[in-house]
Image: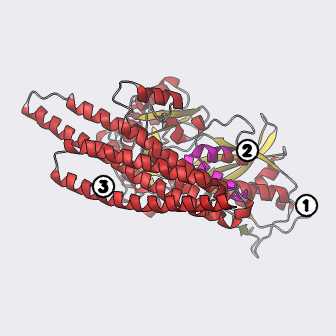
Amino acid sequence: MVVDKIVECIPNFSEGSDQSVIDAIAAAIEGVESVALLDVDPGKATNRTVVTFAGTPEGVEEAAVRAIKTAAELIDMSRHSGAHPRQGATDVCPLCPVSGVTMDECVEISRRIGKRVGEELGIPVYLYEHSATRPERRLLPDIRVGEYEALAGKLGQEEWCPDFGPNEFNERVKRTGVTVMGAREFLIAYNVNLNTRETKYATDIAMEIRETGRVKREPSPTQFYCHGKIIRDHDGKALKKEGTFSFVKGVGWYIEEYGIAQISLNLTNHKVSPIHTVFDECVRLAAERGLRVTGSELVGLVPLDALLEAGRHYLKKQHKSIGVTAEELVHVAVKSLGLDELSPFDPQKKIIEYRFRKDPALAGMQVNDFVDEVCSDSMAPGGGSVAALAGSLGAGLATMVANLTAGKKEMFERFEEMSALAVKGQSVKSRLVHAIDEDTEAFNRIIAAVRMPKKSDEEKAARAAATEAANQYSTMVPLHTAEACLEALKLAYEAAQKGNPASISDAGVAALMARAGFEGAMLNVKINLPGVESEEFKADLRARMASLHDEFGSVYVETHQQVTKVLKVLAQS
């Protein structure tokens, strides 16, 4: 399953012992095709199970409703007890944007789910966090005050009128309780390892960096802040010192399994307080105290962008170009943060987007296999895929020149410029690699449209509409490839102008590959265009093609002249 838009959902169910109930809820989620069940974590003492799943917005909506329905059928809140605060069979159901989805979109999804749960299932729903309709309902503890036992008195009061569902403690609500629904930022559970067994030292650092901070203390005779005398006001109340980071919660604890103390952190908004920034501060504070951070640990899943940003951060500290692949950025992040100290770190299992990633059929092939596939009598891959491959190689070569230049100490003054060029190159290269398989997908859409039934007038109309859409798509794919090849050529030109002269031949070949990709893509546009019926569409496309041809030709001439010029200088030296 390949998913462009990914939403995570983490419902908490008030059952932690009866495995048959937990399995039934998990099965309800797994029954939705476009979602993946990522984790099921039951707790007997809390009598609560935290389930994590993710998928498309539509899939997550449907899976959430099914899971809440199943929980309502199998869990009786009037008989429930447990150590964790709770007020419903599905106690809380947060949604988090992961990839390709905004917080506003998650808010809308949460409200759609809440409306369905209230109207279809008859369960009162309160909206919280970013979805809250009232400021006093933004925080979960404020909504949960009094827990399940207070619902009979709360429901029916104007201030506790649910956002969706019944405003009465009827027989059904007596069984199901209420559900809190909302959208929030992705929570990253993150532990930093220390070379000590002393929990109080981990707690000392945790209190220093967490948002709630700590009590103020006088300077300590030791390096540990926690040894200092508490500073109080004239009424004897301890004064507070603000923590370093917002959206960070933290405690210290001892892990007997590993024989170390950990700074245990919840990062509730990694975009404001990134993993790498928090880690670096832990390193600094540990060193001040005569301790050493030996590594760290991610509990559960992590969004890809959190590790990409960490990788860029540490490459910049090493004065290395950040224009490298996502896989390399992840590797740098894992090693720099020491995420593999306690156990192996498998990006395919730990990065949430990778759980949905599927290697492309063509772009994932070995070179020999791809060439053999091109040689076969199959209609795909054809010229469009080969053109995209050529363009991607052009972008890749331009990126290589930029990275080689950025790594030369003699060209230090161009480091930032070349690093930025390499970042652009990686982006263009990725677009063109994606187009290798997209061109085949365009061909498959045409075949699928042609094979549609055409007996009735309705079927004929549907087939004609699908055919037109497929033909238009089959022209737009190579046109986008041509546009990306133009971007690759511009990268080659900049590499030829400002890159290391010793790599000028690589910049020249980059331009040639971009040209091959461009011309090949344009041929595919031209051969597919007659199949389109819309004259307006064809006229617009022809105008765009003419403009692209003019711009490409101009940049290519300048690139060729620059490459020739540098080669002449090198020949005379």
Q: Is 173 one of the magenta-colored residues?
A: no
| Residue bearing mark 3 | 545
Find the residue positioned furthest to the left: 457
Find the residue positioned furthest to the front: 572
Closer to the eye: label 1 or 3:
3
| Residue bearing mark 1 | 222
Q: Secondary structure at mark 1?
A: loop
Q: Residue at x 76, y 52 (%)?
A: 203
In which quadrant will I find the C terminus? bottom right
Q: Residue at x 39, y 59 (%)?
A: 553
Q: Which residues are magenta?
A: 303-331
Find the distance from the CA under tag 2 to the CA under tag 3. Answer: 50 Å
Find the distance from the CA under tag 2 to the CA under tag 1. Answer: 28 Å
Q: Secondary structure at mark 2?
A: loop
Q: Residue at x 48, y 25 (%)?
A: 23
Left-right relation of 559 to 264: left
Closer to the eye: label 2 or 3:
3
The residue nearer to you, when weighing 446 against 481, is 481
The residue nearer to you, when weighing 93 against 483, is 483
Dot 1: within a 10 Å radius of its alpha carbon, few (fewer than 14), some, or many (20 or more) residues? few
Left-right relation of 389 to 164: right
In which quadrant will I find the N terminus? top left
Q: Position of residue 448 (x, y in %)?
A: 25, 31
Residue 231 occupies quadrant: bottom right
Of the residues shown, which amino acid type is indicated by label 3?
A: Met
Q: Position of residue 562 (x, y in %)?
A: 54, 62
Q: Position of residue 314 (x, y in %)?
A: 69, 54
Q: Main secondary structure of the magenta part?
A: helix
Of the residues shown, which amino acid type is indicated by label 2?
A: Gly
Left-right relation of 342 to 377: right
Which dot marks residue 338? 2
Of the residues shown, which amino acid type is indicated by label 1?
A: Thr
